[in-house]
Amino acid sequence: MKVLVTGATGYIGGRLVPNLLAAGHEVRCAARTPAKLAGRSWHDDVEVVEADLFDPASLKAACEGIDAVHYLVHAMDGTGDFEARDRRAAENLRDAAAAAGVSRIVYLGGLGSADGAPLSKHLRSRHEVGRILADGPVPVTELRAAVIIGSGSASFEMLRHLVEVLPIMTTPKWVDTRCQPIAIRDVTHYLVKVLSVEETAGEVLEIGGPEVLTYREMMHTFASVAGLRRRIVLPVPVLTPRLSSLWVGLVTPLPTGLARPLVDSLVNEVIVTDDRIDELVPHEPIPLRRAIELALTRVQDLDVATTWASAGRPGNGPPPGYGESASRRAASRAAGTLPEDPRPEDPSWSGGTVLTDERTVRCGAPPEELFRTVSSLGGKVGWHSPRWMWELRGLIDKLAGGIGVRRGRRHPTQLALGEAVDFWRVEALDPPTLLRFRAEMKLPGEAWLEFRIQPHGSGSLLRQRARFHPRGLVGRLYWYILLPFHVLIFPRMARSIARQAEQDATEAAAPR
């Protein structure tokens, strides 16, 4: 079949695509920013098109000639009214698929029964999206899953960090709510197989692993697999969902805005009550212990293909023009109805106030070696300046509801356009001359950290530039209050990067 994958830049979609290819399907990937897929190992084996779920015209074009659509988009990024965005996106996809003559939509939703406690906003939205898609003429296969266990998934990372960081934890009553976790490889298996089973069309099917567990039991299982002492879990009745999400936001890489709907959903029992999937798509899902072992192995082997942060832009909220395709944004700006974002390459006098800290250093290493060093910034390597300062800035960001620095990076040396690194995201990548990060921490403005490299004699020249576009007086005060820290951080960072590159180049040239 010819399959369109929406959400290919995200966690599930990025892992589904190679499985679809392995099954012999022809794959088209729709993305608001196609360049984000350039670094994927399967990029040359798929067709990539620019499309936006909030732009019906581009979405209809993406659906042309398609047999089936995998709908794997969720607007829950910690900002704004995600329910309204989910609703609008589902309506647009439903109508575009119908207009293009698509024969099937496959949608991944969430478990949860309305018979028990009222569904959380997150689960309610998941169910509503399924109903909206099914309202159209195209048959929908809706798969409903609970907690997905896999390296880089939001649920797994929340579980992992809670257990690793806290040997003793006080938790709300939801710690004893039952759920049925499922491994990411089992989820992608079902997403692929239902395409070849006609009887799954027009059905809502529940999928889950072989065990029903409480969240407390899941934490104990993780501790056992990871070789940690058994965690002491003390449920208390006074922790509200809001307090719980703040606590989860501080301890884990997830921003509070994303942790809140996930925590809210933990009050709902999410278990499989309809096992028709076993007859339609026979399969033996792996148990939780094995799923955790595989996820941890992926992390240790630096083989994490996608993470929960792969597609979204949590932190500062949507940028101007959010929900419009690039072509429509360009048209809007040409018509004067949408302002252009300030860009680091703009001249200093344009676009209002842009505050800059620029450092230039010479480096004895060639540009390729210097770029490798720059590409290793963040994560465990840090930022070649006092780590405690970055940790403090990350803690402040967490307290403000941001993402902090615990998000780290997917791989210690490899980067891709759009990839998350601590509280930055790769905005421009052109080896070995340019790497630019855009800040995703909570800020009264927009910030970039840019590295430009050019040959210089037998070595290189590194131009490091931090730029800040402030919003109002608060933004300007923020920059000038931090100036003393900039004096400590940025010169040292540039010099240290150059020294590290020279050291690595010397070691690489040494006889072995």
Image (cartoon, rainbow, N blue to C red):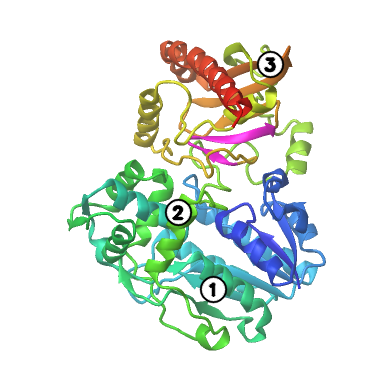
- Mark nearer the viewer, 3 or 1: 3
* Residue 143 - label: 1
Q: Residues within 10 Å of mark 3 (few under 14, many from 20)?
A: some
**Place of residue 309 in the rendered image (x, y in percent of width and height, measured from the top left):** 52, 47
* Residue 154 - label: 2
Q: Residue at x 66, y 25 (%)?
A: 343
Q: Is residue 121 magenta?
A: no
Q: Residue at x 51, y 19 (%)?
A: 472
Q: Residues within 10 Å of mark 2 (few under 14, many from 20)?
A: many
Q: Residue at x 25, y 52 (%)?
A: 240
**Place of residue 352 in the rendered image (x, y in percent of width and height, measured from the top left):** 63, 16
Mark 2 vs 1: CB contact within 8 A: no
- Mark nearer the viewer, 2 or 1: 2
Question: Which residues are the magenta region?
Answer: 419-430
Disc 2 or 3, which lies upstream in sequence?
Answer: 2
Instruction: Choose top left, top right, bottom left or bottom right for residue 87.
Output: bottom right
Q: Amino acid at mark 1?
A: Leu
Report the front residue among 122 and 339. 122
Disc 3 or 1, which lies upstream in sequence?
Answer: 1
Is residue 454 depicted above or below 439 in this figure? above
Write down the residue under mark 3.
459
Numbered disc 3: secondary structure: strand
Mark 2 vs 3: CB contact within 8 A: no
Q: Residues within 10 Å of mark 1 (few under 14, many from 20)?
A: many
Disc 2 or 1, which lies upstream in sequence?
Answer: 1
Q: Amino acid at mark 2?
A: Ala
